[in-house]
Image (cartoon, rainbow, N blue to C red):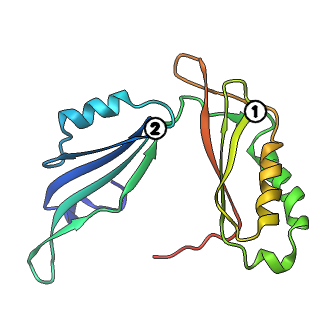
């Protein structure tokens, strides 16, 4: 796992996997770093847009105290994506320009520095159409949320996602807009 040098881990304790599939949640554990039979079976049954969170517990020998400590790696969340992602016909750069040109001048400057991060979910269906546009997290300003919802609903000309057999498939997207706070 990125960020965890092998030297930090003296022994793996467990791998917990949380799967969300068809609106059901499954929590499966292994007794070490080898996935259980049930974990492998569920991984093989995942479909596009299903997600899984992974939490690894391990033992760490503290070089200062020389004692073994139990720790958890940062959770990793993964989403099953199609072999070929849905794409705006004119490319992501033009999509970003479209959003900037049609939103920045319409959002009052007094709101811009006070906005929370706006998160919008949507999907692109098998025909390349935008569907199910919803606000998952508000900016804190209804007029900003509505503006970005309208812009998202007006995205046009998408090439649908395709699976490894070349079949068009539905793909979920997340659009984030506004202030993003970074921390340790």
Relative to residue 182, is residue 6 depicted above or below? above
Relative to 21, does residue 97 appear above or below in the rendering? below
Image quarter hosting the C terminus: bottom left
Which circle, 2 or 1, is nearer the viewer?
A: 2
Residue 90 position in % (x across, y down): 81, 37
Q: In this view, does 84 lie to the left or right of 106?
A: left
Q: Is residue 147 above or below residue 130?
A: below
Query: Label 1 crowding class (10 Å Cα cut-off): few <14, some 14-19, many 20+?
Result: some
What residue is rendered at 82% in x and 54% in y?
99
On screen, residue 184 versus residue 9, left or right, reads right
Q: Mark 1 points at which residue?
A: 158
Numbered label attached to residue 168: none
* Residue positioned 44% across, 46% down in the render: 78
Q: In which quarter of the image is residue 45?
A: top left
Q: Quadrant of residue 143?
A: bottom right
**Residue drawn at (19%, 33%) of the image:** 37
Q: In the image, residue 75 lies at what x, y percent?
A: 36, 58
Q: What element carries label 2?
A: loop
Which is nearer the eye, 129 or 22? 22
Residue 49: x, y in percent? 51, 37
Q: Would you name the residue on which mark 2 appears?
A: 50
Marks 2,1: beta carbons within 8 A: no
Q: Residues within 10 Å of mark 2 (few under 14, many from 20)?
A: some
Residue 101 in picture, x, y percent from top left: 89, 57
Mark 2 / mark 1, whichever is N-terminal: 2
Relative horizontal placement of residue 177, taking residue 2 as reference (left or right) = right
Residue 104 placement: quadrant: bottom right
Q: Which residue lies furthest to the left in this view?
A: 67
Q: Nearer the viewer, residue 77 or 122?
A: 122
Label 1 residue SS: strand
């Amino acid at each position: 796992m990125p960020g965890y040098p092998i030297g930090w881990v003296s022994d793996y304790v467990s791998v917990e996997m949380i799967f969300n599939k068809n609106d059901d949640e499954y929590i499966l554990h292994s007794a070490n770093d080898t996935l259980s039979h049930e974990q492998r079976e569920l991984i093989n049954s995942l479909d596009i847009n299903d997600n899984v969170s992974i939490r690894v517990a391990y033992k760490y020998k503290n070089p200062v105290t020389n004692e073994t400590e139990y720790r958890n790696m940062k959770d990793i969340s993964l989403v099953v994506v199609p072999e070929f992602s849905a794409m705006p016909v004119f490319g992501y750069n033009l999509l970003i320009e479209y959003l900037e040109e049609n939103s920045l001048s319409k959002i009052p400057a007094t709101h811009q520095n006070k906005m929370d991060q706006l998160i919008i979910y949507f999907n692109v269906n098998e025909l390349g159409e935008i569907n199910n546009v919803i606000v998952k997290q508000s900016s804190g300003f209804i007029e900003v949320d509505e503006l970005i919802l309208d812009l998202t609903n007006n995205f046009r000309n998408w090439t649908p996602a395709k699976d490894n057999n070349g079949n068009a498939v539905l793909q979920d997207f997340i659009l984030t807009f506004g202030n993003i706070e970074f921390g340790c």
